[in-house]
Image (cartoon, grey):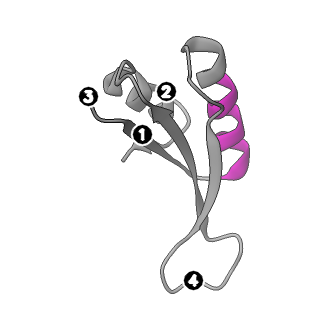
Amino acid sequence: MTDVRHVLVLPDRDAAEEVASELAGRFSLAEEPRLVRDALAGEDDAEDAQWLVVVEDPAAGLDPAALDALAGAHDGWLE
């Protein structure tokens, strides 16, 4: 079975940190989610950035619909 990586896209760092915390509490994760700042193409302003929460799912056991719903509750989405 192949390892799966889920990427949740959030509008700001606070939302990303909250989602990462909720992920750890709601799901059995192999490792802590990683937060990554994703500057929007062509934007120089540090405020114009999305934040990614990267979740490794080696057993492919996480439900993508549940992850998308969690991100959606914070104005984000599952990539």
Q: Are marks 1 and 4 in contact (CB under 8 Å)?
A: no
Where in the figure is residue 59, as x and y percent of width and height? 38, 22
Eye-nearest disc, 2 or 1: 1
Disc count in the image? 4
Q: Are marks 4 and 2 in contact (CB under 8 Å)?
A: no
Q: Earlier in the sequence, mark 1 or mark 4?
A: 1
Residue bearing the label numbered 1: 6
Work out whether 19 lies above or below 8. Answer: above
Magenta-highlighted residues:
12-22
Q: Residue at x 66, y 41 (%)?
A: 15
Residue bearing the label numbered 4: 43
Residue bearing the label numbered 3: 1
Where in the figure is residue 49, as x and y percent of width and height? 61, 66
Q: Residues within 10 Å of mark 3 (few under 14, many from 20)?
A: few
Q: Mark 1: which amino acid?
A: His
Q: CA distance from mark 2 to mark 1?
A: 13 Å
Q: CA distance from mark 3 to mark 2?
A: 25 Å
Q: Residue at x 58, y 13 (%)?
A: 26
Residue bearing the label numbered 2: 70
